[in-house]
Image: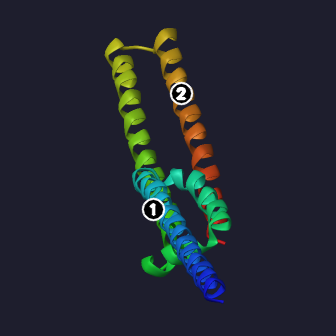
Amino acid sequence: MLIALLSAAIAAAAVLVLWRFTRAMVAAQKEANIQRLLQVFGQASAAVQRDPRQLLVWYPLAESSRKLFPEAFAELDRVSGGQFPFTKEHVQTAHARCSSDWLAWERAHDAEFSLRTAQIEDDIARAGGPPSPLLRTRLAALEQQKLESYQQRYEEYIKTAKALAALEH
C-alpha cells in the first residue's frame, strides 16, 4: 500500500513538473514570437518612415502575420495602444507624405525644366535671327523629355496613392 501511495505521489509530481514545463515552453514560445515580430516590424516601421511607399509591401505582410500569430499581435496591440505595427493613422500619414513628396517633386521638376528651357531660349536670342534647326530640335527634345518624365512620375504617384488609399478602407 505504501509503495502504491508513493508511486501515485511520484506520478502526480511528474505530471505537475511536466505541466509546469509545458506552460513554461508555451510562454517562452509566445515571448519569442513577440520578440521576432517586434524586430521585423520595428525595421518595417523605420523603412516606412523613410519611404511611405514601403507601406505597400509591409502592410499586407503585417496583415498575414497577424493571421498567423493572433495571440502575439493581440498582446502587441494591447501594449502599443493600437493596431501593431501600422494603424490607420500610419496609413493616412504615408498617403499624405506621398502626396506632399509628389508636390515637391513637381515644383522641382518645373523649376529644373524652366531653367533648361531658358538656357536654350537664351542661346536662341544670342544667335540673333531665326533659331537654327539644332536649337529648335534641342528645345523640342527638352519639352518631350519634360513631358515624359512628368508622365512617368505622375503614373507612379497615382498608382501609389490609389494603393495607399485602398489600405485606409
Disc 1 versus disc 2: nearer the observer: 1
The image shows residue 164 at horizontal and vertical percentages of 60, 60
The residue at 49%/73% (across/down) is 76
Instruction: From the top left corner, tell me how far across and down residue 97 is, in percent.
Output: 45, 59
Q: Position of residue 101 (x, y in %)?
A: 44, 52
Number of numbered labels in the structure image: 2
Residue 30 is situated, as x and y percent measured from the top left of the image, at 53, 68
Residue at the (64%, 84%) spot, across then down: 8
Q: Quadrant of residue 38?
A: bottom left
Look at mark 1 in the image and give the residue it sits on: 35
Q: Is residue 46 left or right of residue 18?
A: left
First reached walking from the N terminus: tag 1 or tag 2? 1
- Indicate the secondary structure of the residue bearing disc 2: helix
> In the image, which disc is placed on residue 164?
none
Give above or below for 60 relative to 30. above
Label 2: which residue? 145
Q: Is residue 32 above or below residue 150?
A: below
Residue type at mark 1 is Gln
Location of the C terminus (image quadrant): bottom right
Residue closer to the observer: 50 or 119: 50
Mark 2 crowdedness (10 Å alpha carbons): few <14, some 14-19, many ≥20: few
Nearer to us in this view, 60 or 6: 6
Camera-side residue: 62 or 149?
62
Camera-nearest residue between 79 and 137: 79
Give the answer, above or below, for where 122 lies relative to 166. above
The kind of secondary structure element at disc 1 is helix
For label 1, the crowd category at 10 Å Cα-Cα, with few meaning under 14, some 14 to 19 and many 20 or more, is some
Distance in Å between CA atoms under marks 1 and 2: 49 Å
Image side of residue 147 versus residue 67, left or right: left
Tell me the residue at 46%/66% (across/down).
Answer: 93
Amino acid identity at mark 2:
Gln
- The quadrant of the picture occupied by the N terminus is bottom right
